[in-house]
Amino acid sequence: MKTRSLATRLSLLLSATVIVIFSLSGIALYHSLTTQIGVRDDAALLTRIDQIRTLLRDEDALTLIQQKPRLFANMLGNTESLLVLRVPGQPPLIVVNPGQRPVPAITPVPADQPLALSSVHHLAAADGTPFISAAALAPTRDGNGQIEIITGRLMSDRTQTLNGYRDQIILASALAALLVAAISIWLVRRALTPLRRLAAQADAIDVRHLSQRMPEQAAVELQPLVAAFNQMLSRLELGYQQLSQVSADMAHDLRTPISTLIGQTEVALSQKRSVAIIRRCSDPITRSWNGWRR
């Protein structure tokens, strides 16, 4: 299995770090935007109910509903909105429901209570699109009864906005990762230049150049490595010198006995000798050889 280079591993590590940071930042921003848009939409829905409440309280409710039904439709301002006005327990007086969505069964806020963000109900349509709704009771001007206001809105535009924002986050994270990967490769290779220079200098040292040392003017992180390498070279040089001296001493010690053996052998071979004489002449050679072996 091929081992990845240090530059490759550092580049991958930096790229992964950037992806994680961008992803976490994007997720945080996405949730923050989702919350802010949700609060804005909930507040807009409650404002609409408040406006209808005020209108019904200041005008003749039944006459207004019968004579100006389009007024309430125009107040919605969105084909994905829903509005139902009815006397509690009776058929609706007006229904504005372009999308033909089911009217949510929710408990209305009493007429004497103010509306709050907690009054908004969050549901989901059949396709999973968020649907917000709220209901409240409004007193009439004559004070003879109350009218129930039910309104809601399908959050298709918000879903599209958030989906687009999510896609932008993913694209930005991917592009940032590629950019940082390219930059990090260049930076890491540039940062490792002193290490490659040291490797080249170390490769130039052999038996003939054991006295050569690595330059100590290296990066702070590499100084311990340079110092340890130079100490190793010093020990190798000392050991090599000692080994050379031992070899020289051995050569000097062996020169005289070998010369003697050569001389005795030449004398023995230069004349005709009997076996006994040759054996007697070979005894010193044998003793010398056995002595060297010991």
Image (cartoon, helix red, strand yellow):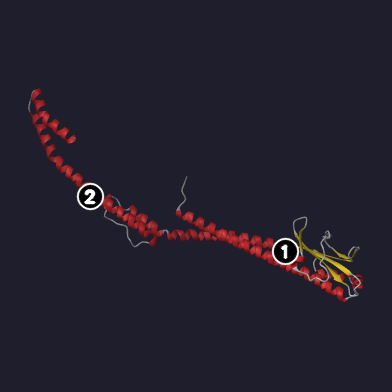
Q: Looking at the picture, which amino acid does disc 1 mark? A: Arg
- The local secondary structure at tag 2 comes to helix
Give the residue at the far top of this rendering: 275
**Within-10-Å neighbours for mark 2: few <14, some 14–19, many 20+:** few
Mark 2 or 1 closer to N-term? 1
Badge 2 is on which residue?
Answer: 241
Q: Looking at the picture, which amino acid does disc 2 mark? A: Gln
In the image: residue 215, left or right of residue 51: left
Q: CA distance from mark 2 to mark 1?
A: 83 Å
* Residue 79 seen in the current view: no
| Disc assigned to residue 158 | 1
Who is closer to the viewer here, 193 or 15? 15
Which picture quadrant has residue 262?
Answer: top left
- The local secondary structure at tag 1 comes to helix
Measured as percent of width and height from the top left, residue 277 is found at 8, 25
Figure label count: 2
Q: Is residue 281 above or below residue 170?
A: above
Query: Which quadrant holds the C terminus?
Result: top left
| Disc assigned to residue 218 | none
What residue do we see at 63% from left, 61% from top?
Answer: 27
Which picture quadrant has residue 193?
Answer: bottom left
Measured as percent of width and height from the top left, residue 7 is found at 46, 55
* Residue 244 seen in the current view: yes
What residue do we see at 68% from left, 65% from top?
Answer: 35
What residue do we see at 78% from left, 68% from top?
Answer: 45
Measured as percent of width and height from the top left, residue 89 is found at 90, 63
Measured as percent of width and height from the top left, residue 256 is found at 12, 39
Who is closer to the viewer here, 220 or 204? 220
In the image: residue 107, left or right of residue 163: right
What residue do we see at 39% from left, 56% from top?
Answer: 196
> Mark 2 near mark 1, Cβ–Cβ under 8 Å?
no
